[in-house]
């Protein structure tokens, strides 16, 4: 998920794998060196809820008065491997 903040001249990229937040990058250039092979992650319900909330907010009608100021973009990075998933 890519979130742009033009007021701060910042782009955050949240890497999500199977509904788990596994990494946060500061821009597209960090995608080139990204590898999930050595990362260990576990499912976190709170993180999953935030991901779902962000995705649902994307579906807001553009003419709605509460439209997001900084819309989310979904991208699929090139193959970066899969993290080692730890069970709780």
Image (cartoon, rainbow, N blue to C red):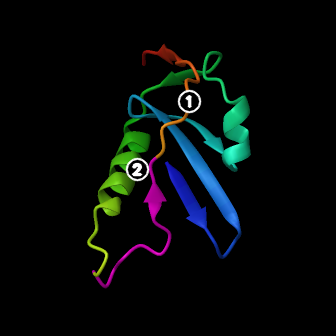
> Is disc 1 placed on a helix, strand or loop?
loop
Name which residue lies at 31% across and 85% down: 65
Q: Is residue 73 positioned above or below 76 on the image?
A: below
Looking at the rendering, the stretch of residues picked out in magenta corresponds to 64-74
Name which residue lies at 39% across and 28% down: 18
Quarter of the view holding residue 9: bottom right
Q: Are marks 2 and 1 in contact (CB under 8 Å)?
A: no
Quarter of the view holding residue 4: bottom right
Q: Is residue 67 positioned above or below 84 on the image?
A: below
Residue 73: in magenta span: yes
Which residue of the protein is positioned furthest toward the front in this rendering?
78
How many C-alpha atoms fall within 10 Å of the one at disc 1: few (<14), some, or many (≥20)? Answer: few
Residue 88: in magenta span: no
> Is disc 2 placed on a helix, strand or loop?
helix
Quarter of the view holding residue 56: bottom left
Decide which of tag 2 and tag 1 comes sooner along the chain. Answer: 2
Q: Position of residue 48 (x, y in %)?
A: 38, 40
How many C-alpha atoms fall within 10 Å of the one at disc 2: few (<14), some, or many (≥20)? Answer: few
Task: Give the number of the disc on residue 78.
Answer: 1
Q: Where is residue 64 in the image (x, y as percent from the top left)?
A: 27, 80
Q: In this view, does 85 lie to the left or right of 58?
A: right
Front disc: 2 or 1: 1
Pick the front one: 39 or 11: 11
Q: Position of residue 32 (x, y in %)?
A: 70, 34
Task: Give the number of the disc on residue 50.
Answer: 2
How far apart, in angstroms, are the residues tagged by discs 2 and 1?
24 Å
- In the picture, the quarter occupied by the C terminus is top left
Pick the front one: 24 or 41: 24
Q: Position of residue 7 (x, y in %)?
A: 66, 76
């Amino acid at each position: 998920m890519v979130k742009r903040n033009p007021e701060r001249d910042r782009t955050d990229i949240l890497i999500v794998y199977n509904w788990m937040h596994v990494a946060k990058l500061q821009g597209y250039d960090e995608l080139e060196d990204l590898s999930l092979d050595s990362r260990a992650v576990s499912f976190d319900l709170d993180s999953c809820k935030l991901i779902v909330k962000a995705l649902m907010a994307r579906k807001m009608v553009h003419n709605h008065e509460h439209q997001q100021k900084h819309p989310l973009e979904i991208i699929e990075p090139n193959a970066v491997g899969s993290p080692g998933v730890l069970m709780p």
